[in-house]
Structure formats: structure tokens, C-alpha cells
Image: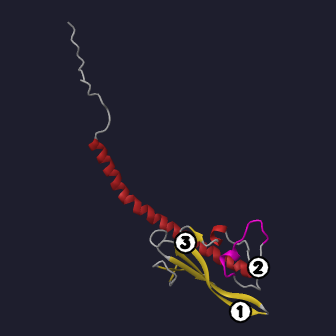
């Protein structure tokens, strides 16, 4: 007689994870996500703020070039005047100095505007002698924490509350 040394598994050969094992794995994933998601949003806000600062600097540079190109007009008092269609001839109304997204007033979670333009009239020609650039987060705490401003002095300042009361200089 030959004995069969193999054990029979009585039909219990199912392979896979038990419900408890799946719950443990899900709990671990939730714990990791709890720590990771705030860091990801913080990094995104910091990236948006860096983009806003660079965009303000680009607008300042475009204003200087606009003033040199169209001295009778002085500075531009709208982002649209600094922008323009590619391929179209530059003009004081559309100088083609800014990228279309920035000329449209929104970029990387921030809203940009040219405000407080001072105008003088010289020889029946309006000339803007100063301006202020503002960049505010579209949703404070989500797309950015701070608001940013600059003017014809070219210094970028920020408002820690996300508004336009910019008093702190960017280092």
C-alpha cells in the first residue's frame, strides 16, 4: 500500500486578501494622505506666489519698454495695452510686450491689475505718469497666501493677508 503523503486541502485553496488586511492597507493610505495633502497644497501655493512675483517683474519690465517705445503715452494703464495678438503690428493699444495669459489678468491662481494710474494732458495728449500693479490670490489660502504690488518705483512688496495693502518688501 502506498500512502498518499500529500494533504488534501478540502476546497480551501482560495487566495487573496481578507477584509481585515484590506482595511489595514486602506487605513495606512489614509494616514499617509493626511500628511501629504497639506504639504502638496502648501508647495502649490508657494509656486503660485513665486509665479506672481515673476509676473509682476515682467509687467514692470513691459511698462519700462512701453514707456520707451511710446513716450507720448507714458505708461500703459491696462494689461491689454501691454499685451496684444502675435503677428499683429504693435501699437499703443496692444504693444505685444506681455504673454496673453498675463495680459488677460489671470495667471497661476492670481488676478493681476493695473490701477491708480495718474494721467496728465500734454499738448492734447493723455500721458500716464505713474501706475500700480496688484496681484491677489483668486482664493486666499488656496491659490496663494499673500498679495503682491509694485509701482513705477519697481520695488515688489507684499500684503501678508492676501490683499492690496502691500507694505512688506520682497527680499
Alpha carbon distance from label 2 to label 3: 28 Å
Precedes in sequence: disc 2 or disc 1: 2
85 is within the stretch colored magenta? yes
> Sequence-wise, which precedes: disc 2 or disc 3?
2
Residue at label 1?
120
Q: Position of residue 170 (x, y in %)?
A: 52, 78
Q: Quadrant of the N terminus?
A: top left
User: Picture quarter containing residue 41?
Assistant: bottom left
92 displayed left or right of 3: right
The furthest residue to the top: 1
Checking the image for residue 69, the label placed there is 2
Inspect the magenta stretch and tell me whether residue 14 lies in it.
Answer: no
Q: Is residue 171 visible?
A: no
Neighbours of disc 1 within 10 Å: few (<14), some (14-19), many (20+):
few
Q: Which residues are magenta?
A: 76-89
Q: Name the residue rendered at 48%, 77% in the picture.
A: 162
Residue at horizontal 60 percent and vertical 78 percent from the top: 113
The circle drawn on residue 110 is 3
**How far across and down, in percent of the image, does residue 15 sit?**
31, 32
Question: Is 74 above or below relative to 26?
Answer: below
**In the rendered view, does 162 fall on the left or right side of 87?**
left
| Secondary structure beneath label 2 | helix
Figure quadrant of residue 3: top left
Dividing the picture into quarters, in which one does residue 125 lie?
Answer: bottom right
Given this view, does label 2 or label 1 mark the residue nearer the observer? 1
Inter-mark Cα distance, 1 to 3: 30 Å
Amino acid at each position: 500500500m502506498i500512502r498518499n503523503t500529500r494533504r488534501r486541502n478540502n476546497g480551501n485553496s482560495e487566495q487573496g486578501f481578507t477584509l481585515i488586511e484590506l482595511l489595514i492597507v486602506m487605513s495606512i493610505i489614509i494616514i499617509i494622505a493626511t500628511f501629504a495633502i497639506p504639504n502638496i497644497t502648501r508647495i502649490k501655493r508657494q509656486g503660485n506666489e513665486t509665479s506672481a512675483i515673476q509676473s509682476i517683474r515682467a509687467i514692470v519690465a513691459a511698462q519700462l519698454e512701453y514707456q520707451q517705445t511710446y513716450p507720448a503715452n507714458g505708461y500703459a494703464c491696462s494689461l491689454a495695452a501691454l499685451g496684444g495678438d502675435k503677428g499683429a503690428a504693435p501699437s499703443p493699444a496692444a504693444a505685444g510686450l506681455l504673454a496673453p495669459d498675463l495680459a488677460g489678468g489671470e495667471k497661476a491662481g492670481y488676478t493681476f491689475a493695473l490701477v491708480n494710474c495718474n494721467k496728465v494732458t500734454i499738448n492734447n495728449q493723455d500721458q500716464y505718469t505713474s501706475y500700480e500693479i496688484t496681484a491677489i490670490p483668486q482664493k486666499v489660502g488656496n491659490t496663494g497666501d499673500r498679495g503682491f504690488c509694485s509701482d513705477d518705483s519697481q520695488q515688489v512688496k507684499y500684503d501678508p493677508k492676501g490683499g492690496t495693502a502691500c507694505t512688506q518688501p520682497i527680499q
